[in-house]
């Protein structure tokens, strides 16, 4: 395998536009062949990718070492370097991930909703690829493989734009992907990595609806907000996860403690971790002290309303170091850290109103043994995932059985919540007649 | 019923923004109640609307007369005045349309895809409203009733912005809609008409994603293109319909003549009328002369490729007055008129490539008795509707059995093709556990 090339320096505006237009045209052309590819061809490409990732592990690590040296020289922190590093373990998990996508059912070509109409025509819908998917992501090079694999399986062409810090790793991975596509009889241009460190490439990608059908941004809130501001291409995007658990007056206290502990502390950084806890006033005195004891032991800072403060004071938490008065801003904050806001509410209606006002329409849960309370909550809370007696941490493509996840969507149009292969597809109408005409 | 009010003169930018912000806030609030409404409440509102439209026919015509007088004074043409006029027949058909929407199944609350996961949680999806729908349309006031009714039935709040020429008619209709909502115990703000002739209101609506979840523009290509340029709110939009029929080498000639006649001449102005005819070279000499005789008799102008011209010359069409050499631009033109472009192609593959290159991804048909040719065409033509042995004129919500249609979408994300009630909804995930935690 020859060493992959990419452009080290920023380009002139004209050259960059030319580069991206060429990539766009090639992707559009390749998307026709990708859409026609058989399940076997797509699976062959994925298995070849798995094989090549393993057999080229040392070349990948050499390319990755360049990125790591550059990143260290630029003074990036340890967490950043960690996300950027391709260890043997990361490489093996990319290969295993590919093999898992092979097993998933091919969504393309499925025909549903067949109806015979009074005019004699037969109308149905066929699942088809979206066309060209643009993926914009940050430093993890394994996204290059994961995202490309999901797009290949769903019959789409892909343009990948990873962080410029991972350019050597990503172009090396692209080389492998393109080799695998060719071995499966598919066009190498079915997956392209934008081969430049020039950050202006992102700004162009999001304004090329003629070449890119949908952008999937995978990254932090500030990246997404920036893309939303300037984007002309539709996006499947995830902004933030201000997830709530509401503990109802008819909640089982023991279950609720277990679930609220898990929702907050199992991991702090994922978007589906609980950030705000609402407790019905009738159970607050019984429920909050034992739960807050657990949080205290795990070092979770609590930002609480006045009623919560009173209850905790009465229970002897007065001197707790990590106990803070909540301010308005806390109700709209995604901490992604060992911090939790807590509010006592007077009713289920108040809880629902609070969530619909301050939440981010991501994932919200109710703890209750009363099924009509649960039903009201599930129906009226306007979020992508609503849960009953379960930890918000379940909001995830794998947990939902989607097999894999290209991202999570906060939007209501197209895909909502965790987005699997089906979210990368669309439906077209098929009409079959026998010389049928409209009268 | 008191006379409805609206603003005759353009507003200052500050006042207009204030007006639309207030409308947006009220719509957002009302959307919660609309989402919770029972099927019975929604149907009551629709039946009340039908009753009130009929019983207030004379008031509606008085309001409409104001618009008509203004439109005539402004020198609008007869076709424009015709679209604007509320006759007894138009009023009755609005009422009948409402009764038809009552009969449609309520999509909201339906639960699908229930799965029990290995972790013990049950995952399913519930159909929910989108929230607030903005409808931007031109002079026909009956759209006010049709669009409001579909949004009510699908549990959404609606902000309607019709043509400023129909402002008196639309505010009178809005009054009726709001009265009907109140009679059904629903908030009057569930449907609001923007009460100003100021055209800048449209520019604000399409940049208020905090209040409007989706915009449905119903109007000509130039309106849509302008909205796309500046819009920040997702749109369910229809651009153009450059619809093709491809007559294959294995087509039944008699069926093909009947269907191609219907697709072009049954009506000239709809977006699903055929604009471009592709004919396999093997059948062109046999097929084109009899069909073109029909077109000639109906006064259809033909813009043809060189091969077509040769075939028609040989068949004695030489002196036909409406026979023109096609230029490149013809292949990308939506005539919406008695004009048709015709091209002879060498193969099915060439036909597919031509359609995917010059078409508008709206509706394209193949005439063939060979089912594998049909399958290839249906799969590879990248359009919202693909048809086999049927007239493109069937591409329509009513013909497809959707019951009613809010619009037709050229997009691939969310809804594609004719959009019925389901296109105004989304799915949310429901997760049910029993104190379930993620490990």
Image (cartoon, coloured by chain):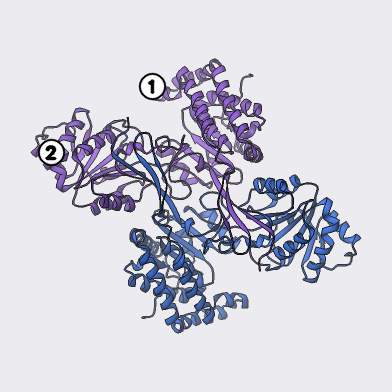
Chain colours: A purple, B blue
Q: Which residue is drawn at 75% across and 57% down?
A: B277
Q: Residue at x 54, y 44 (%)?
A: A425
Q: Is residue B21 something one can see in this rendering?
A: yes
Q: Earlier in the sequence, mark 2 or mark 1?
A: 1
Q: Which mark is residue A300?
A: none
Measured from the top left, where is residue B411 in percent x and y? Answer: 56, 52
Against A252, residue B76 (above or below) is below
Measured from the top left, where is residue B115 in percent x and y? Answer: 40, 41
**Mark 1 highlights which residue?**
A78
Disc 1 chain ID:
A
Q: Which mark is residue A312?
A: 2
Measured from the top left, where is residue B184 in percent x and y? Answer: 34, 70
Measured from the top left, where is residue B121 in percent x and y? Answer: 34, 39
Does residue B141 appear left or right of residue B350 in this picture? left
Q: Name the residue nearer the viewer: B239 or B290.
A: B290
| Secondary structure of the residue carrying numbered label 1 | helix
Q: Residue at x 51, y 60 (%)?
A: B420
Q: Name the residue nearer the viewer: A64 or B184.
A: B184
Does residue B305 appear left or right of residue A61 in this picture? right
Q: Name the residue nearer the viewer: A108 or B1.
A: A108
| Secondary structure of the residue carrying numbered label 2 | helix
Does residue A90 appear left or right of residue B178 in this picture? right
Against B13, residue A338 (above or below) is above
**The C terminus of chain A is located in which quarter?**
bottom right
Contact, CB < 8 Å: mark 2 with mark 1? Answer: no
């Amino acid at each position: 395998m020859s060493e992959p090339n990419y452009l080290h320096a920023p380009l002139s505006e004209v050259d960059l536009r030319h580069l991206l237009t060429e990539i766009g045209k090639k992707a559009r052309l390749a998307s026709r062949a990708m859409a026609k590819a058989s399940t076997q061809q797509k699976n062959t490409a994925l298995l070849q990718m798995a094989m090549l990732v393993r057999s080229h592990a040392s070349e990948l690590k050499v390319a990755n070492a360049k990125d790591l040296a550059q990143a260290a020289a630029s003074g990036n922190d340890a967490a950043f370097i960690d996300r950027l590093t391709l260890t043997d373990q990361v490489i093996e998990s990319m290969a295993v991930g590919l093999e898992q996508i092979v097993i998933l059912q091919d969504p393309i070509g499925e025909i549903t909703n067949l109806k015979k109409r009074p005019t004699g025509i037969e109308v149905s819908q066929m699942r088809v690829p979206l066309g060209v998917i643009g993926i914009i992501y940050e430093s993890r090079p394994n996204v290059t493989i994961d995202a490309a694999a999901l797009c290949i399986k769903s019959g789409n062409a892909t343009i990948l734009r990873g962080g410029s810090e991972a350019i050597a790793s990503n172009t090396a991975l692209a080389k492998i992907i393109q080799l695998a596509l060719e071995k499966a009889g598919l066009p190498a241009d079915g997956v392209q990595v934008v081969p430049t460190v020039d950050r202006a490439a992102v700004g162009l990608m999001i304004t090329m609806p003629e070449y890119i059908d949908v952008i999937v941004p995978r990254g932090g809130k500030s990246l997404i907000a920036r893309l939303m501001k300037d984007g002309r291409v539709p996006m499947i995007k995830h902004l933030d996860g201000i997830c709530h658990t509401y503990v109802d007056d008819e909640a089982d206290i023991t279950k609720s403690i277990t679930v609220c502990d898990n929702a907050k502390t199992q991991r702090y950084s994922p978007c589906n971790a609980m950030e705000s806890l609402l407790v019905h006033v009738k159970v607050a005195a019984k429920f909050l002290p034992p739960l807050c004891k657990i949080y205290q032991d795990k070092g979770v800072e609590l930002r609480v309303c006045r009623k919560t403060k009173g209850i905790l004071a009465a229970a002897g938490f007065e001197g707790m170091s990590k106990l803070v008065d909540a301010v308005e801003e806390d109700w709209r904050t995604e901490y992604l850290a060992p911090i939790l806001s807590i509010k006592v509410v007077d009713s289920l209606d108040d809880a629902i109103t609070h969530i619909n006002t301050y939440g981010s329409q991501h994932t919200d849960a109710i703890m209750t043994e009363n099924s009509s309370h649960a039903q009201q909550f599930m129906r009226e809370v306007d979020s992508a995932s609503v849960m009953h007696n379960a930890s918000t941490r379940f909001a995830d493509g794998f947990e939902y059985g989607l097999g894999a996840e290209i991202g999570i969507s906060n939007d209501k149009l197209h895909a909502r919540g965790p987005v699997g292969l089906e979210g990368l597809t669309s439906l077209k109408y098929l009409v079959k007649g026998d010389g049928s005409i409209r009268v």
